[in-house]
Image: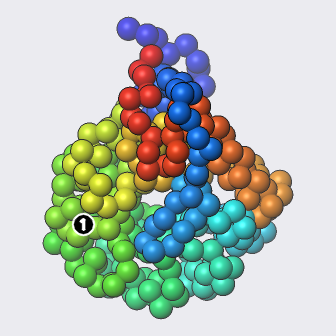
Amino acid sequence: MKQNINPNIKAGDANQITREYYDSLLIEMRHIDSVLPCTTFELYGEKFATPIMTAALSHLDKTRLNGTIEMSKGAFDANAVMWTGMGDEAELEAIIATGAKTIKIIKPHSDNDIIFRKIEHAEKCGVLAMGMDIDHAFNHKGEYDTVLGEPMSPKTLDEIKGFIKATKLPFIIKGVLSEQDAYKCLEAGAKGIVISHHHGILDYAIPPLMILPKIAKVIDHSIPIFVDCGILSGLDAFKALALGATAVSVGRALMNSLIEDGANGVKKKIDDMTVELSGAMARTCSRDIMHIDSSVIWKQ
């Protein structure tokens, strides 16, 4: 058995396992009949320049003044989808005011009335879509979680159906890491899922790209599949798209750019990752993001 020799990484670190898995995926080149690739991406009736989106981050003002708004401006300038997590009503309104097409993710609050109020407010704001972070119901002790003093709890399938029926907008379930939950999301009427282990919320969690092909078979192109966690480059994005993702979310890989150069840094990072994605597409005869052959991916 391979031993962990890095004292800074604990055994079972899901983020390290994820990184190692992503790096174990190799790309087969194909050049004959290749064309200039197109990275444009359509989602819920809107067209974007790239399938590389921001992640549903929260509290970015702690890292940079007006950090969340700067992230939104960067996403808008890159013509990319903006996702956002926890935040008050004023913040969401400010995000929408930047012009960024935004997906609002709501925590699984114990009090469902809070959830319904957030759904109503997000719809009034004009978000592109909204959803729920189902994997934040428990803490590492197996107790109900508390996020910034707000109690959380797991949601039943019937509760999720109720949230979905409460809005006319697409509702996305974030935190799917099994075929079983994917089937339940379809039954509930979800209009998208995010494959994610919430940045290693559980030790030894399956890397998103490992489970992605199985979940893609369950979904069978009926709704969008987004991948979160550990996407650091355009090549990571390419691998995810090849294995069945519709688009990917990038969080921590944008943080240094946000801190150093605000919106301009975010735009440049998304643009650079998109260029890298385009380069991989060109060298694999992938004319657009809907036509990336999964057989170009090899497991080392």
Q: Quickly name the residue at label 1.
A: 155
Q: Nearer the viewer, residue 102 or 2?
A: 102
Residue occupying the point 55% across, 13% down:
5
| Quadrant containing the N terminus in the rendered view | top left
Left or right? Give the position of 226 relative to 237: left
Q: Residue 175: give x, y in percent of width and height.
A: 36, 54
x then y, percent, for residue 279: 64, 37
Q: Residue at x 29, y 46 (%)?
A: 216
199 sits to left or right of 57? left
Q: Identify whether 205 is placed above or below 255.
A: above
Residue 82, x across and y down, in percent = 58, 67
Can residue 190 be seen at all in this image of the molecule?
Answer: yes
**Residue closest to the far top:** 1
Q: Quadrant of residue 226?
A: bottom left
Task: Report the residue that reaches farthest toward the bottom.
Answer: 124
Residue displayed at 46% across by 67% down: 43
* Residue 173 in view in this figure: no
Q: Quadrant of the C terminus?
A: top left
